């Protein structure tokens, strides 16, 4: 059993799966070895599907347009109040707009955010990101 944790592992899994398919096409392999190889191929395919279906991020895209987007995402579990969540957000998530003498810099910045407590007791945040266009 292998653990697919990145794209390199995924490529290796595909290559070994292809190698196993080619070897099974050879009719000189004994039947008990074929059964074992088929089981390993099934397990390898399951691991590949599991890796490909795994979400990359907890962030959920709520709304977007060509110059803005709104994300919703969970804050770390150690956050115990809305004030702590807002402080955490300002420290680690807030995107400042740097002043520029030029218009339309294309930089991203936070236009607003909201921290709230979900029904499960965990704190979540909405983050509205705009682009200077």
Image: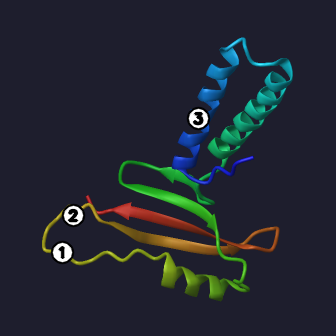
Which of the two discs, 2 and 1, labels the residue nearer the N terminus? 1
Residue 105's disc number: 2
The label nearer to you, 1 versus 3, is: 3
Between marks 2 and 1, how big is the CA–CA gap? 8 Å
User: Which residue is denoted by mark 3 in the rendering?
Assistant: 14
Residue 4 on image: x %, y %: 64, 49
Q: Secondary structure at mark 3?
A: helix
Residue 65 on image: x %, y %: 42, 48
The colour scheme is rainbow
The label nearer to you, 3 versus 2, is: 3
Which of the two discs, 1 and 3, labels the residue nearer the N terminus? 3
Between marks 1 and 3, how big is the CA–CA gap? 48 Å
Residue 100's disc number: 1
The answer to which of 89 and 5 lies nearer the viewer is: 5
Do the CB atoms of the residues marked 2 and 1 lie less than 8 Å apart?
yes
Extreme right residue here? 32
Quarter containing the C terminus: bottom left
> For residue 116, which quarter of the picture?
bottom right
Residue 49 on image: x %, y %: 68, 38
- Compared with 47, 89 (above or below) is below
Extreme top residue here? 27
- Compared with 41, 95 (above or below) is below
Q: Is residue 16 left or right of residue 127?
A: right
Which of the two discs, 3 and 2, labels the residue nearer the N terminus? 3
Residue 121's disc number: none
Extreme left residue here? 101
């Amino acid at each position: 059993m292998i653990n697919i944790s990145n794209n390199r592992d995924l490529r290796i899994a595909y290559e070994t799966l292809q190698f196993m398919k080619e070897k099974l096409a050879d009719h000189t392999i004994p039947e008990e070895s074929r059964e074992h190889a088929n089981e390993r191929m099934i397990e390898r395919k399951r691991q590949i599907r599991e890796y490909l279906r795994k979400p990359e991020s907890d962030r959920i895209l709520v709304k977007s347009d060509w110059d803005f987007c709104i994300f919703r995402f969970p804050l770390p579990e150690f956050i115990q109040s809305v004030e702590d969540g807002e402080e955490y957000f300002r420290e680690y998530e807030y995107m400042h707009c740097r002043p520029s003498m030029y218009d339309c810099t294309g930089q991203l910045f936070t236009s607003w955010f909201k921290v709230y407590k979900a029904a499960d007791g965990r704190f979540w945040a909405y983050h509205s990101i705009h682009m200077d266009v």
